[in-house]
Image (tube, rainbow, N blue to C red):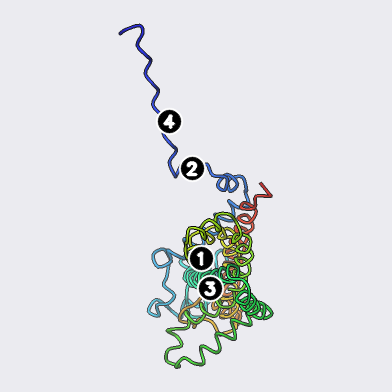
Amino acid sequence: MSATQAPAKPAPARAPSRWARALDSDLLYSFRRSPLAVGSATVALILILAAVLAPWIAPQDPTNVANLNLLNSFNPPLPLEGSDWTFPLGTDEQGRDVLSAIMFGSRISLIVGAASVIFAVVVGVAVGLLAGYAGGMVDAFLMRAADVQLTFPSILMALLVDGVVSAELPRNLHATFQIYVLIFAIGISRWPQFARTVRGSTLVERNKDYVMAARLIGLGQVRIMATHILPNVLGPVLVLGTLTLGLAILDEATLSFLGVGLPPTQPSLGTLIRIGDDFLFSGQWWVTIFPGVALVLMVLSINLLGDWLRDALNPRLR
């Protein structure tokens, strides 16, 4: 080798993968540093997995009448006297396993809550974008409509919508479409919060330089709102959506407890609590207490995650 030969150049460093960047993100670092967020996420994940996998891991299918045995009714939970390891949380008046009923009920509650929040997000984001970007009479009309709806409690609005829609449906279709009516009723009662949040962010974003540049090059108004403004206003929507999910699950439980939610053939957590309330003071407390505890844990863990997400995405708190 010649003494004057130039040394070999080092190979260029490889750019970190998307997965490596995600693991090193500020959001994940904040999550690992918060024991409350980790604990809430763990509880929420266990409850969600139990609900999603209920048809495969639940000890019993509570919706299948062939699996029920009245001789097993009102079995107490472990470790009370007379309990059975087959029913660790006891049984109700029909011999249904309370643990299995909670898993299937959580599944329905999560479906209704998540679907209603998605519906509220779609409507609220669309209205907020249009109001904030258009301004003028359009903004005034849409926001006054949101203000009028905000004067009514969300549960009262959901009751009103549920009653009107159910009255218009034929009686033989009530059981089939009740879950869709419930999703629509809860979603339509929650959209104003998203609309006002997105409208406020849009008012700030519409006068920034990148929006002005998009107008100068001739992009359409809809494209500017969808591809330029919308991605920059989704941060508050994500936080609000997480917090609203817990409220939507509570709305569903309240409606079902009042008897205007899902039918007994599709028991949600609210329906289970309503059924068990009839036996609360006759000694069979577990029929309503355990579904109530599951509902509290689910809503509390989701709300705590929403609080952490709000703080983690706030640049003033970093």
Give whichever of discs 2 and 3 has the lower sequence position: 2
Nearest-to-viewer mark from 4 and 2: 4
- Residue 230 percent location from the top left of the image: 53, 62
The mark tally for this picture is 4
The mark closer to the camera, 2 or 3, is: 3
Residue type highlighted by circle 2: Arg
From mark 1 to mark 4, how far is it between C-alphas?
A: 57 Å
- Residue 131, quarter of picture: bottom right
Q: Spatial distance from mark 1 to mark 3, Cα to Cα?
A: 43 Å
* Disc 1/disc 2 C-alpha distance (Å): 44 Å
Image-quadrant location for residue 121: bottom right
The residue under label 4 is 13
Tag 2–tag 3 contact (CB < 8 Å): no
Q: Find the distance from the CA under tag 2 to the CA under tag 3.
A: 33 Å
**Quadrant (top left/top right/bottom left/bottom right) for the N terminus:** top left
Callout 4, which amino acid?
Answer: Ala
CB atoms at circles 4 and 2 under 8 Å apart? no
Locate residue 19, reporting x and y percent. Answer: 44, 44
Give the mark nearest the N terminus, 1 or 4. 4
Question: Would you name the residue on which mark 2 appears?
Answer: 21
Residue 288 image position (x, y, % from top left): 59, 74
Left or right, 79 with respect to 227, comes to right
Residue 9, above or below 46: above
- Which type of secondary structure does the marked residue at label 1 adopt? loop
Position of 307 relative to 14 (above/below): below
Q: Which residue is drawn at the image coordinates 48% and 60% (left, top)?
A: 227
In three-dimensional space, the C-alpha distance between marks 4 and 3, rounded to whole angstroms, equals 46 Å
Q: Mark 1 points at which residue?
A: 88
Residue to which mark 3 is pinned: 123
